[in-house]
Image (cartoon, rainbow, N blue to C red):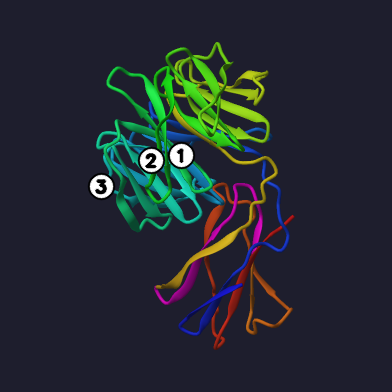
């Protein structure tokens, strides 16, 4: 439990005491119309969950937060996993950012045109803007432990994957070569799954670079975005604007799980049954009133509670969110007159 005192009011950032189960979400960046769509395997679809973006390509999900790389504006935006904008220009000054990957509190960005991998915190602070340099058009990133895998494309259009450490040291500058045109890739366990637009296939490789199956999934239409959850692979087809679902052994589950996408590129998927713990964020006084942002999940009911003694058990409910469509809302304490108050948020089952 973490406590922050603000002018006599204490904020207790707690996870929900009752955990809600969240339906599996697939997020896809539509470069053609500047949107990020949310596709729920057991629920409603929101094809334009986030709009007004500038050629979004890279996506990464971390807990309740979604990060979007905008190639056109050279920015990384931060949103809740339900689409609430937190900071649309969290990181700026990038050079055609494509792939992004997150490890803990670190966010790595591939700058396509400058050939540079930059490292930032998930709060937007620069750690090392030139962590790795001299790459040839890096387009994709994936992390396994302390190893950073980087997809690059040659002048002839063929792609390869290099391996570095997350501190920037070289492991293998040509771990996997001869990929048929660039496409997204993702890591699950000891396997790397790569989308290849040139021959419209998904290949499977070991993390040591060995070829497991160079045509694990075939017959796709310019696949780009790819994500794995459990034993299922989800693929965004740039050519026909669809999302396909397959098993990690290559069996087709549903080749047209969703359709009508607009030049889909980046794809990120949350694990099935992942817990959606609401959090309290950005506390402060605004126009003389104490406010904070409650971040949960779309359609999830959250309750903000208060006590005046952190050891007390008689928490008082101040507000119930009543299923906000964006999963987040601004809470204002109408009467913070006590010398100190402690707050928490709970997901209502």
Residue at 54% from the left image edge and 20% from the top image edge: 202
Residue at 28% from the left image edge and 44% from the top image edge: 94
User: According to the image, label 2 marks what residue?
Assistant: 69
Q: Which residues are magenta?
A: 287-303
Q: Secondary structure at mark 3?
A: loop
Q: Quadrant of residue 183?
A: top left
Residue 236 shows up from this direction: yes
- Asked if disc 2 and disc 3 are in contact, CB closer than 8 Å, the reply is no
Residue 121 placed where, x, y %?
A: 40, 56
User: According to the image, label 3 marks what residue?
Assistant: 93
Q: Count numbered badges in the picture.
A: 3
- Distance between the alpha carbons at the discs numbered 3 and 1: 18 Å
- Asked if disc 1 and disc 2 are in contact, CB closer than 8 Å, the reply is yes
User: According to the image, label 1 marks what residue?
Assistant: 59
Q: Secondary structure at mark 2?
A: strand
In front: 221, or 134?
Answer: 134
- Distance between the alpha carbons at the discs numbered 1 and 2: 6 Å
In front: 150, or 98?
Answer: 150
Residue 342 placed where, x, y %?
A: 59, 78
Residue 84 placed where, x, y %?
A: 48, 49
């Amino acid at each position: 439990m973490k406590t922050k005192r603000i002018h006599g009011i204490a904020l207790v950032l707690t996870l929900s005491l009752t955990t809600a189960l969240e339906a599996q979400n697939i997020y896809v960046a539509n470069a053609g119309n500047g949107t990020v769509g949310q596709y729920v395997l057991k629920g409603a679809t929101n094809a334009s969950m986030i709009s007004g973006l500038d050629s979004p390509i890279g996506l990464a999900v971390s807990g309740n937060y979604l990060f979007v790389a905008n190639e056109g504006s050279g920015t990384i935006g931060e949103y809740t996993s339900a689409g609430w904008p937190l900071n649309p220009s969290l990181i700026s000054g990038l050079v055609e950012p494509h792939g992004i990957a997150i490890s803990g509190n670190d966010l790595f960005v591939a700058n396509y045109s400058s050939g540079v991998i930059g490292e930032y915190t998930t709060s937007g602070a620069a750690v090392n803007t030139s962590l790795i340099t001299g790459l040839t058009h890096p387009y994709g990133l994936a992390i396994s432990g302390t190893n950073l895998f980087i997809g690059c494309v040659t002048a002839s259009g063929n792609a390869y994957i290099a391996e570095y450490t997350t501190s920037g040291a070289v492991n293998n500058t040509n771990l996997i070569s001869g990929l048929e045109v660039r496409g997204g890739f993702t890591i699950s366990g000891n396997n790397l799954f790569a989308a290849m637009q040139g021959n419209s296939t998904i290949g499977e490789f070991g993390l040591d670079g060995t070829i497991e199956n160079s045509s694990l999934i075939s017959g796709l239409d310019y696949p780009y975005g790819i994500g794995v959850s459990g034993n299922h692979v989800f693929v965004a087809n740039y050519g026909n604007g669809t999302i396909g679902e397959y098993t990690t052994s290559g069996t087709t589950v549903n080749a047209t799980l969703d359709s009508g996408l607009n030049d889909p590129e980046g794809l990120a998927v949350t694990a099935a049954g992942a817990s959606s713990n609401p959090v309290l964020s950005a506390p402060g006084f605004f126009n003389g009133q104490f406010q904070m942002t409650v971040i949960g999940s779309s359609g999830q009911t959250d309750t903000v509670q208060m006590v005046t003694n952190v050891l007390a058990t008689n928490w008082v409910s101040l507000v119930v969110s009543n299923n906000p469509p964006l999963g987040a809302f601004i809470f204002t304490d109408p009467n913070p007159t006590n010398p100190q108050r402690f707050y928490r948020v709970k997901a209502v089952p």
